[in-house]
Image (cartoon, rainbow, N blue to C red):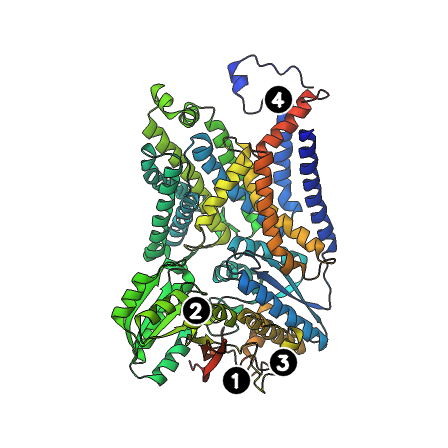
Amino acid sequence: MTDLNRRHILGLAATAGLASTFLSTLSAFADEKELVIGGSIPLTGVFAFAGVAIEAGISDFVKIANEAGGVAGRKLRLAYEDTAYKVDQSVAVFNKLTTQNDIHLYYGDSTGFAKTINEELNRRGSILMAGASFGSELNNPEKYPFQFMAGPDYVEMIAILLEYIAKQQKGAKIVFVNSDTEFGRDPIEASVKRAKEMGLDVVGQIVTPPTAVDVSTEILKLRRANPDFTIFHGYVLAPLPEFLSQAKQLGLKSRFMGTFWSMDNSLWANVGAPADGYMGVMPYRYYYDTAPDAPILEKIRKLRPTYQATGYMQGFLTAMLMTEAAKRTLEAGKALDAKNLKASLNTIKDFDTGGIIGVPISIPGNSVPVGRIYSYSAAEKQMKPASDWISLKK
Amino acid sequence: MRIATAKETYVADEGLLTTNTQRAWMIILALVLVLAPFVLNAYWLYLACLVAINVASATGLNILTGYTGLVSLGQAAFMAVGAYAVAFLDGHLGTPFLLNIFAAGLVAAAVGVLVGVPSLRVKGLYLAIATIAASFILHFVFTHWVSVTGGMSGVNVAPARLFGIELASPFALYFVIVPITAVMVLGAANLFRTRIGRAFIAIRDRDISAEVLGIPLLQYKLMSFALSSFYAGVAGGMWAYFFRVVTPESFPFATSIFFLAAVIVGGLGTILGPILGAAFMTLVPELLKYVVEWLGPVFPNAGAALSPVRTIVFGALIVFFLVFEPQGLAEIVRRIRRFFHLWPFKT
């Protein structure tokens, strides 16, 4: 009897799998009047917190754009799947979505995926891609001709921090702390060089394992170096709260700074008091910003009444910029291929993002080198602007 | 009910395929594999290649863990060695594709022998920890030996070329990856018809008795490590040509667990096990995506809302198979075969 049950269950499982495959193949369709944004988005795995927000951001942009009549007469549609933040799965999703849909715009989930799929993008020559990666390597229009990022690359993010520091305190002492990952190491070498050129004093570099929990030895190194500013990169949250609380206990005078992925408001709200004064570079306005020149944030708040993470803004703006490139290409009567899309993207000059970024932006290359310094206020439980918008000049 | 399969010679008894039914099925499988690329779209071809690469590596791990009884969690690191070897040979020396793949296997085998040295003193979980340590050391080497590995940003690999044809798409690569994997699986199946393979099994069953039988443990354990990492190296080499970029994060530690899980879910110590296990572990998450997609019309925002459920279902499926099929997926196939052998009698 047990045998029979087991076989039945196994048989049913196999039938269900096959049936769903068959049915979904039937449901795949392509509409001439559509503009499909494909997406390898990490809805599970270590980067899920960002992926979920990114998906919400792109979906909302698609909704708002369609309500406004679409793009050059075409309706936008987001076709995406979960990648679990694994390169092989991201590539599988790319292959799957591009066979099922006529895709010219694509959102990728990691630097690894962007590098892996680059040759394929060049070979196809029909897709413009952007994504969650701000890897400085991707900010190279010659090597990555059909990709861009909706913000500054990691080197540019730290350059924005350095500009701020140089204005605050001439010759300030700096320590870089990064995780021992591709993400963490990305901007360090270039940033150390840049800091020295700007007359800042780099007094130390600390590398931690990506999953470090105990940071007491690193804190001792930090105490010996006694910097005015400590710049973290390559972390989302842990072990930054541990660093901050231990540094406060030891009475270190250093101010602590980070880059985009460690700047989400809700992450720091849970940390509480030790987070007070944590600063960092943020290319976009926060969800709750009620600046008069940010009408799009008002719309977003109406669509989603609760706080949306920074990934939301990133996804929203990425979709906005790639759609703008498609719009310009279609309006010029050109074919929707990667070359035309990228050329149209590069014509974006002094573009109003509806307030997501506080200044008009231009995309001459692969990045948008603009950002603003925010500082966390534990009392108000919010990231507050600490500087005006800083645009890097090449 | 099958009758008249009595073997008259030892050679016939040792044959890989002993009945005409088996031969017929094998011909059908070969035909399906040959025709598949002309029927499947890019997505399924991509998955087919990925499954083939994973099968090659899982088969290697099965030689070590399933047949020799040495638990290893270093398979991903050995694959990475193979992938870097291919990237280096292709980029610096420009040697031909097949030679690079073979050399990748040899380099990985050499590293595997080094890693395998502690296996004479330690077994079981202790050996597993030793292989984990080795993979961390190798990860450090990949990150810091910048002149060879390109450091954290890794190295790009040019498309494979064979007889002047560029193998850039999954369609083209399918015709090399699948045959290489087929040869490797065939090699593994044959291995256990030789003295070496049987020595591995003897070591697994009781290493002291094996030594008493005259099997030099160190030599055979290292040979098992070498063979296993050769398979991983070749798989890693094919991986490098398939994804065309190798970074230290291409083969995370979780990949080693993936292969161990594939071998266990498929069936330890069987040739069919790692094939089914690797296919299961690679394809089921993808097939579950279809279920999510299928629920799209009835479940608003299915993609975002159901993706976490999908991973839970995948995990639950693994537990389900371990509980109901402790001997792995290969046992299901064996039971089906037995059913037809004995039909119309009950098994």
Measuring from the top left, give residue A96's x and y in whole percent: 63, 55
How far apart marks 2 and 3 lie (CA) works out to 32 Å
Do the CB atoms of the residues marked 2 and 3 lie less than 8 Å apart?
no
- Residue A359: mark: 1
Mark nearer the N terminus (2 vs 1): 2
Secondary element type, mark 2:
helix
Location of residue B229 (image quadrant): top left
Dot 3: few (<14), some (14–19), or many (≥20) neighbours within 10 Å? some
Q: Closer to the observer: label 3 or label 1?
A: 3
Dot 1: few (<14), some (14–19), or many (≥20) neighbours within 10 Å? some
How far apart marks 2 and 1 lie (CA) works out to 22 Å
How far apart marks 3 and 4 lie (CA) works out to 73 Å
- Residue A136: mark: 2
Secondary element type, mark 1:
loop
Residue on which disc 3 sits: A298
- The kind of residue tagged 3 is Glu
